[in-house]
Structure formats: C-alpha cells, structure tokens
Image: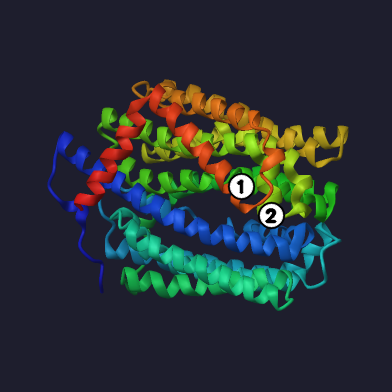
Amino acid sequence: MQSGPDPEGTPESGGGRASALQRRARVAVLVLVARTVGHQLVVLGGQVYLARVLGPAEFGVFWIVQFALAFFTIFGDAGLGAALIQKREAPTQRELSTVWWTQVGLSAAVVAIVFATADQVMRIWPDLPAVAPWLLRVMSIELLLTVLRVVPSILMEREMQFGKLSVVEVVMTLGFYVSAVALAAAGYGVTALVTAVLVQGSLGVVLVYLARPWRPSFAFDTVALGPMLRFGAIYQTKGVVGFLNGAVVPIYGGGVLGKYAFGLVTWSQNTAFFPIKLVEIVGRVNFPLFSRLQDDRRAFAESLERSIQLCAIATLFFVALVAGIGPQLVAVIWGDKWMPAVPTLYVYAAAISIGFLSPVVAGAFDALGRPQVMTRLSIAWTAFNWIAVVIALRIAPTPMAFAVGYCLHVVIGNAIVVLYVRRLLPDARLWPRVRASLVAAVAMALLVRATHPAAWVTGPFTLIVAVLGAVASFALVVLLVDRSAVSEVRTAVERLRRR
C-alpha cells in the first residue's frame, strides 16, 4: 500500500513554517498559471472551432444535459474530499480508503438513478432532441470516473504537487478537445461533446494514478468518517446552494428563452467569467495553504491579500478588454453568429469585476473551519437571484433582461462578502490590493475605445496588435500606481527559478 512521503511532517515552527508554506504556495500558483496559459490556449482553440461548427442551439442542448447531470452529481459527493484537504494532520491510509469506498458507493448509486430516470429530462425541456436522455446516461459515467481519481488528486493537492496535477489536467483537456473536434468535424453534432467528456474522464483516471500511485485498502472506519461527514455536509451544502443558484439559468432561463437564446446567454456568461479559471487555481492552492496557516492570522491575512491582488489583476484586465474591444473579439475569434451575445457579454463582464472576490474568500473561510459563513450568504443570494430573474423575465423575456436580473445577486452578494472579510479578518486590507488594477482597467478601456477599434480591428493580426497595446497600457498604469504588484510577481518568478 502506497501512501507516499508526507512533506507536511517537516518540523518547522512559527513564522518559518508560514514563510515556507507561502513560498510553496507562490511557486504552486506560478506552476498552475503556466499550466493554465497552455491549457487555455488548447481550450480556446477547441472552443472556437466547436463554436463555429456547432452554433448556439447545439451548445444549448449540451449545457442543458450537463446541468441535468450536475443535479444528480451533487448527491454523489458528500464533501469528503474537502474534509481531507482541510485536516491539519495528514490523513491516514484507513481514512483515505474510507473516503474512497464511500464516494464510489454514492456515485454508483447516482449513476443507477440517472439511467432509470433520464427520460424525465424531456418533461422539463420538451424542445430537446430525442437522443437527449441517452446523452445524459452516457455522461453520468463521468461521475464515476471523477470519483475514482479523487484520493490521488487530494494527496497531490495536500502535498502541493501542482506540477503533476497540471500535466494530468492538460492531457485531459487535450483528450477532450481532440476527440470533440474530430467527431464534430465528422458530423456527430452534440454527441461529439458528450463522447469527448468520457474520453477526458478515462484519461484522467489512468494519469492520476500514474502521477500519484495509491491503492485503497479493504477498510472502512466509521469513527473517522463521522467528523469528515460533519464538515463535508456543511461544505457540500454550499455546493448544493450554488447549484440551485446556477439552476435558474437552465431551468427558468432555458424554458422561457428557448435553446437558441439560452445558448447565447450561457456562452456570454461563460466567456465573461473566463478569469474565474485563474481564481479557481488560486483557490485550489489557497485551501491547503490556508488550512496549514489557521493559527497564524497575520500570515493568513497576507496570503489572502496576495491572492486577491493576483485575481484582481487578471480579472479586471479581462473586463477592460471586453469593454474596449468586445465586439471585435467576438467577430474575429468566434464569428458573426455569436454577435447577438455581445450586449449580455458586457453585463456579465461588469458583474465579474467584483464577482471574483467570493471564490477566493470562500476558500479562506473554509480553511478556518467556517464554511457556514459562505453557506448562509449563498442561501440568501440564491433566493434573491431566483426572485430577480423571474421578475426580470416577466418584465421582458429577453437575454438582456435575464443577464441583468442574474448579475444583481453577483454584485450585491460580493459587496456583502467584503463586509464579512472586514469583520472576520480585520488584518486583511483588500482595497490597497485592488486599487491599481481598477485604475488600470478604467484607463485601458477608455484608451482602447478612443482609438475607434471598430474601424481598424478587422482580423487576427489587428486584433493581436490591439490586445498587445491593451496589455502594455494596463501594465504601465499598474506599475505607476502600485509597484508591489510587480515586485510580488518578480519575487515569485525568482523563487521558481531557484527551484
């Protein structure tokens, strides 16, 4: 039985331990950012090709099927993975095996339920194609594949072996898009996307066990499972609430708007929320890091500040880029068929300029053993979101009305999150960390629009020129307003080189 060395057992104390963990976290972030650059280039290329071949209606079908599967998936995860990561001490082989068997059993039961009830999806979305129930059944197998790779992934996250995880994820993404593009080109339509999901999941299972060998024992510890289930239940409640919050898009929005308009709205939301990819990276690193720093509140607050600073730079640059050359980005990259989504793209981009905060802060509260904070907030803004969207679509059943109604809870909810941070983490100073990025984003957007991009950004070359100019202007303003952002990146790069 292989459980591997436990790097968490290195005897360090006080500030030395905190500094070592922060250094490892910075390196992990850089590794994951480098992975994400390559990863997102693959994703962008694949998504652009698929968007040009399939179009809004077919993507609408795929996203609805994905949502239907997600409904079942929330019952197949008891939050045990998060409980293992949050533990101060390294999990034992017996605990890992207990979690593995529990989640395999839950996911197998969910897959069986999906196979038995998949036909009911047509009652909710009657305009779906007849093949939709079988698409859902096939995709449900991905749930089991995901669970099979949970424990090795958790071990690598606790050990901050994000380099190995990055390789696994990049190869999985390549597997998805290579198979999806090949099948879409052959005319398989939405079936190409579903098949690619299974290819991706199968690759993940093989690769994760090669990267971090581990075997489950024939052991089941009910005593150890109890505390993990208690934490996991609270943690998973937040996931359930988040699911219900997002459910307003396919259930109500999809029903009122239809699959074409639903495809446009979902595409614009996914595109505007693109920076959340970086936020997810930071969150993955922060959860194990913050869990180790629970008793050092100053180091905890500093790590949170740096995380928010990094996320603000990436998010606000992207928001400014959309504000400056949004129509040109859509026309050149995705094609004219997606131009009707530009107005809602603006709305979602404006919302994410503050909406990036809650995923980062949620990881901090979880690491402190207080997931109930975000759970309560999530319940409140989910109820508000459903009310706002229903009212907005009754006033005007259009994609724009839906986007505005949906984004209200993002803006208001994240403003409340800031108030909670001030109360629960008074040492964390957020405004100085985001000020430079906000000023740079406003300046960049105004500068780019002043050049009248519609007149000269007409193809790939001129689009690249516009983006490079935007990057230069954004970086210059950040440098002038706050040099700490640049020095932080430089220090992390130097540490990465020394490693």
Q: Residue at x 71, y 39 (%)?
A: 454
Q: Residue at x 65, y 68 (%)?
A: 193
Considering every residue shown, the one lying at the far bottom of the view is 186
State the SS at label 1.
helix
Q: Quadrant of residue 241?
A: top right
Type of residue at label 2? Trp
Q: Is residue 80 visible?
A: no
Going 33% across and 74% down the picture, which residue do you hit? 215
Residue 453 higher or lower than 147, as above or below: above
Residue 109 percent coordinates (x, y) = 58, 69
In the rendered structure, the answer to whether residue 210 lies left or right of residue 192 reads left
Residues under numbered marks 1 and 2 in contact, where contact means CB atoms less than 8 Å apart: no
Residue underneath mark 1: 462
Q: In which quarter of the view is residue 185 placed?
A: bottom right
In this view, the residue in front, 279 or 375, is 279
Q: CA distance from mark 1 to mark 2?
A: 16 Å
- Mark closer to the observer (1, 2): 1
Q: Which mark is residue 334?
A: 2
What percent of the width, then of the height, locates residue 266? 70, 49
Q: Earlier in the sequence, mark 1 or mark 2?
A: 2
Q: Nearer the viewer, residue 146 or 55?
A: 55
Q: Is residue 110 left or right of residue 210?
A: right
- Residue 463 is left or right of residue 481, and the answer is right
